[in-house]
Amino acid sequence: MTMMTSLRLTTLLLLTAIVWLTPAHAADAARPKPLRALLVIGGCCHDYKTQKNILKQGIEERANVVVDICYCEDKSTKPPLPILGKPDYGAGYDVIIHDECAASISDAGLIEGVLKPHRDGIPGVNLHCAMHCYRIGNPGEPADPASTRALWFNYLGLQSSGHGPQAPIAVVHTDKAHPVTRGLEDWTTINEELYNNIKVLDTAQPLARGKQHVSQRKKQKDGTEKLIERDDDYVVTWTNTYNGRTRVFSTTLGHNNKTCEDARYLDLVTRGLLWACDKLDTNSKPKAGYGPAGH
């Protein structure tokens, strides 16, 4: 190697070191890695093909999160979700988002496998029809928390069995001091499904309620129709502590695509995810390095 070549190489190495020691590069090096989220989605009754992309894009734009999609195209209430029978499906992930619709999967062994990552401490986020999955027996009858019937309900922190017709839901944030809901405006959705509350467990902390006026005609046994008018009021957003330590965030909102792509909905879901991962500060801002683009 000539003296000139050696000098050039030394200069290049020095310049490289200077660049890497600049504050910008030091900040980049110190920036946390993105949270890894697994979105489990698919099954009956929803446009999951579209919603999986809406959720991935919306969350990744709002926080330093990479969302991997585990999608099942099957449209039945017993979809062959890729996670079934694989209790280690959460390995390597920081949080699991459940947005599947699998009401007819009732095998306790399979349900235990779905719950295994969360029992081991991986946080959970549950959207809409995830509340009506993995049901054993009659979901309309309150389940004893110590029973097998309560496996999924204990994880969620709430038991729901069904919903009324699609109509606007007035969402009222009842816990305005919680980091997930602090500063969020109350709002009214488009036509949506309001899920009932059969039982709210002691481990759950309600954050918002949904109010919906129901007006529908029901055919009677004699062939006549009767107008049914009622006002429903249920918990729609809450947190739960599962197995004594695992953070879980849930909302029953999100049936239709327009709701899923609404900025207010995506803000709520992203905050819930960050809270579940303990990456949301007390002022409802992402902790350093977990905001958009890692800020």
Image: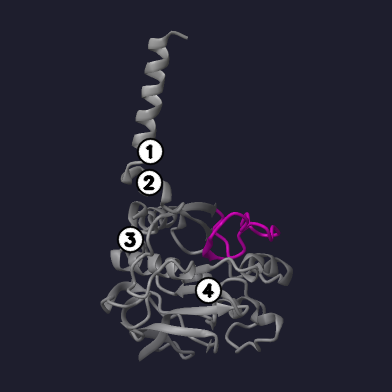
Distance between the Cα atoms at labels 3 and 1? Answer: 40 Å
- Label 3 packing within 10 angstroms: few (<14), some (14-19), many (20+): some
How far apart marks 4 and 2 lie (CA) works out to 32 Å
- The quarter of the image holding the C terminus is bottom left
Name the residue at 63% across, 65% down. Answer: 117
Closer to us: 8 or 244: 8
Query: Residue 91 placed where, x, y %?
Result: 63, 56
Name the residue type under label 4: Arg
Mark 1–mark 4 Cα distance, whole angstroms, equals 38 Å
| Image quadrant in which you'd find residue 210 | bottom left
| Residue designated by label 1 | 20
Q: Is residue 225 magenta?
A: no
Circle nearer the N terminus (1, 2): 1
Stretch in magenta: 73-101
Q: Which mark is residue 247?
A: 4
Quarter location, residue 20: top left
Mark closer to the chain start, 3 or 1: 1
Q: Nearer the viewer, residue 55 or 176?
A: 176
Task: Tell me the crowding category of disc 4: few under 14, some 14 to 19, or many 20 or more residues within 10 angstroms, Cα based.
Answer: many
Between disc 4 and disc 2, the foreground one is 2
- Closer mark to the observer between disc 1 and disc 4: 1
Q: Say which amino acid is labelled 3.
A: Glu
- Residue type highlighted by circle 1: Trp
Q: Position of residue 147 (x, y in %)?
A: 70, 85
Residue 186 visible, this orientation? yes
Residue nearest the observer in this picture, 241 or 282? 282
